[in-house]
Image: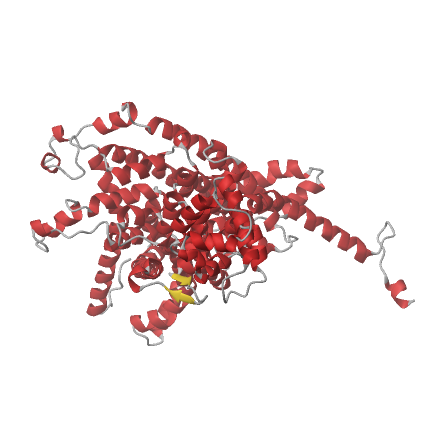
Amino acid sequence: MSSETKQILTTDGIPLEVSLKKAEKKNKIKAFLLVAPLLFFLIITYVFPIGDMLLRSIDDKMVTQMLPKTFKAMENWDGQELPDEEVFAAFHEDFIKLVEDKREGKLSTQLNYTKNGFKSIIKKLRRASKKFEEGNYKEQIMSVHKRWADVEYWRAIQRRAPEFTGQKYLKGMDMYVNEEGKIVSVEEDRRIHRVLWLRTLEIAFFVTVFCFLMAYPIAHLLATLPMKYSNLLMICVLLPFWTSLLVRTASWMILLQQQGIVNDFFVGIGLVTDDNRPEMMYNKTGSYVAMTQILLPFMVLPLYSVMKTISPSLMRAGKSLGGTPFVAFWKVYFPLTIPGIGAGCLLVFILAIGYYITPALVGGASGTLISNQIAFHMKSTLDWSFASAMGLMLLSGVLVIYWLYNKIVGIDNIKLG
Amino acid sequence: MALPKYTEPHYRIWHYIYLTICGAVFFFLIAPLFVIFPLSFNAEEFLSFSDGMKSLDPDAFSLRWYKDMIYGTKNPWGLAAKNSFIIAIFATIGSVILGTVAALGLSSRHMPYKGLIMAVLISPMIVPLIISGVAIFFFMAKAGLAATHTGIVLAHIILGTPFVVITVTATLSGFDHSVTRAAASLGSDPVNTFMKITLPLILPGVISGGLFAFVTSFDEVVVVLFLAGLENTTIPIQMWTGLREQLSPTILAVATCLIILSTLILVTAELLRRRSERLRGINR
């Protein structure tokens, strides 16, 4: 009874609590409706397609759909000895259908990925299958080629039964499933992807370090100079920031070429002889130099915005308490800039790890990154599922860093310009 | 930054070393842009300074690459420039409308799941472009929008909205919500309030977000490389092809024009930023 008497009613006679909740809910819906158009637009055009990439990267339905009856019959096969007549008959039935649709070539390509040697025996089987008599397919197929009587090849077919596979991811790490079903690495001299991953990490790491070392002093200068000078110098940071990436890459291509200005300068000061000009482009050096300059503003701006908030009196206090300028800097100023350092380093690292254009233009063969490999598979080999798999591996790395960034800086605190 | 008179000599030396380092870094940042200017007026077909240019011989300079850029018969720059501007303008309009409206919702304190939704809205900026390119290509191919202007505009809206969301939310963070309540109490409907009160106040943020979206679209090459057909070629695509095949001075003429454009954008953005800070009462 007592709770009823305490209840406050609005003028409409509805309890205040209910009325407030209603208003709150209405406000929530209003706010959400404003965000909804962009949110749904992005979910449909962006988030779902990334999910689609995931499906593509593990999709292995092609063979499954080409040999449905075979795989059904194989369910009772233990894989120890040659399968029995039932499997052979089902395989024959599937195969005849594929030959009718002229799709047996695709089957041979796919099976050849799993085990070498399928191409020729499928061709032979196609020719022979025209003269096959009804019944006893096991004998007839086995007589086409001795590999058809080899249990290894039937196991290889069976391995393609699942609709999904992680083999593209393994391939991205230079690994594969061998005949015993174990995950092993490819031979040492064919491990191209591991080299690329390591190089991507290495270049992204060192570009971040270089950017930090160069950005820290100038951000400090910009933050401590009087406004009228710092505004002028800020243009040096902002103009490259707003200039087209391709323009900046082009200028590095001009500067770094063998007859370019940097080499002219080196010859001029006698560092190298004229006929011995170093290659500074189309290798790692090119990627390092160009990426560092291009990403430098992304380090300067967060550092600057943090340093701007540090009061100069703190350094003075440190010095007045007996610290040398270096001690005061190290013990007082530097710790206060750590949020800016974190923001800048993570931002530059995230951008560098996914860089594509600049390495492709100035990196040559030894300076390209994992992104270039993804683009190569998208545009040249058309192995889209492999490109998707590598893209998602890269993405998961970036998301980890993004999560860290969010923990340390918070995404709402990203500042631009 | 003058040093106090009592500074000890070795700190004085350190200070000058520090200033030298800063000077070198500023030089490293800005100098590469200025190489392009003189070389785009080269009379010859080389990408290095000829002897005539070094001695400032007027005959060594010419406008031939600019003429080639505009009148060159084989040059696709005209079509590319037209496409680039059309795509960038529509992408900017789309990004600004979607982004501003979303930012209004996000700044409301009633917004549920703010962190999660913000993460989704910002993600196109964080995810490496190559991955966005692959994903957007898959979508556009399925929707039948690959190699169309519409497809590229939509793709650039995806990439441009995060910038608008960030700049407008930042502007709204210093926004005094009592003015909209005052407008409502005086009988204004929400749309009218937005157009007459909120929008003029957050306009600097909206425009600077729009500039980011414009530049993002105008300079974007990775996603367009996947999406564009011959008809949809843009300036970045032409530059990319040119830089890959052969570096001709015509590209430098185009690059010079782009630098001038970016200078204009920079000046506009800076003026807006200052105006916005004044309006929000931030005096730094």
How many numbered circles are shown?
A: 0
State whether residue B99 is above or below residue A54.
above
State whether residue B238 is above or below residue A364.
above
Q: Residue A218 vs residue B147: left or right? A: left
Q: Position of residue B44 (x, y in %)?
A: 15, 31
Q: Relative to the observer, which residue lies in front, B189 or B125?
A: B125
Q: Residue A42 vs residue A216: left or right? A: right
Q: Relative to the observer, which residue lies in front, B277 or B70?
A: B70
Q: Position of residue A21 (x, y in %)?
A: 76, 55
Residue lying at 25% horizontally and 46% vertically, measured from the top left: A252
Question: Can residue A347 be seen in the rendering of this structure?
Answer: no
Q: Quadrant of residue A20?
A: bottom right
Q: Residue A332 vs residue A72: left or right? A: left
Residue lying at 65% horizontally and 48% vertically, measured from the top left: A32
Q: Position of residue A105 (x, y in %)?
A: 43, 44
Q: Relative to the observer, which residue lies in front, A282 or A117?
A: A117
Q: Position of residue B240 (x, y in %)?
A: 32, 39
Question: Can residue A194 be seen in the rendering of this structure?
Answer: yes
Looking at this rendering, what residue extends furthest in the bottom direction? Answer: A322
Quarter of the image with the N terminus of chain A in it: bottom right
